[in-house]
Amino acid sequence: MEWSRAGLQAAGFKGFVSFAKLKAAKVPPDPGIYVVLRPSTSVPEFVERTVAGDHHGRDQSVPVSLLREKWVPDAEVVYIGKANARKPRPGRAAPRPALRTRLAEYRRLGEGKDSPHRGGLYIWQLADYDDLLVGWKTLPDEFVKAEETRLIAEFVKTYGRRPFANRKD
């Protein structure tokens, strides 16, 4: 796979909107995979304190030295995530939207608000996080985890390590 916006679009990813425009975007409710791209491959500037909100009263910032160590040179993709189908809320028959809900949680995290999204935290210490783009691809729920694992493994084959903000496979 080509790890650029064009390559991801050819692989079926859609969207590619900034986090600021994500709320108004027509993100599907289906399960699927999402990617976060930094359109520039230049070495980024990192900030000392994350814009992500505190978690249980704890600052989620990590040392800039760790961010420099985790940076993947020449890669546009900085995070690969998944959104599985969500169980219905009590008293409701329909499941909650998967991609739409998961990406809203991720967006809220970057707004400094409380969010259950814990993955991909490092992106919120990029000075240019406003320039990041989010793309998504819908999949049947039973294939979501395997596809996320496959994409991360394919990324590792290309770049020798996981995407910058993927702390685990």
Image: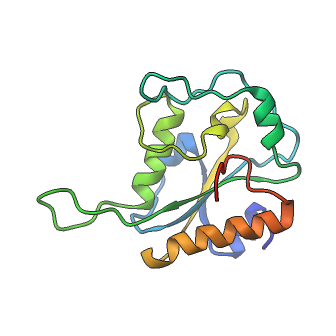
Task: Please identify the quarter of the rendering in which residue 35 is found.
Answer: bottom right
- Name the residue: 42% across, 42% down: 116
Q: Nearer the viewer, residue 5 or 54?
A: 54
Is 121 left or right of 115, judged from the image as shown? Answer: right
Q: Is residue 98 left or right of residue 10?
A: left
Up/down of 114 relative to 160, above or below: above
Task: Find residue 109 and report its horizontal and vertical position in percent.
Answer: 49, 36
- Which quadrant does the C terminus fall into? bottom right
Give the answer, above or below, for where 68 lies relative to 78: above
Residue 140 in view (yes/no): no
- Of residue 160 and residue 72, the one placed in the foreground of this image is 160
- Colour option used: rainbow
Quarter holding residue 90: bottom left
Asked whether residue 20 is in view, the answer is yes
Q: Where is residue 151 in the image (x, y as percent from the top left)?
A: 68, 69
* Quadrant (top left, top right, bottom left, bottom right) of the N terminus: bottom right
Camera-nearest residue between 17 and 168: 168
| Residue 95 percent location from the top left of the image | 27, 65
Residue beneath the point at 53% across and 61% down: 82
Q: Is residue 165 above or below residue 77?
A: above
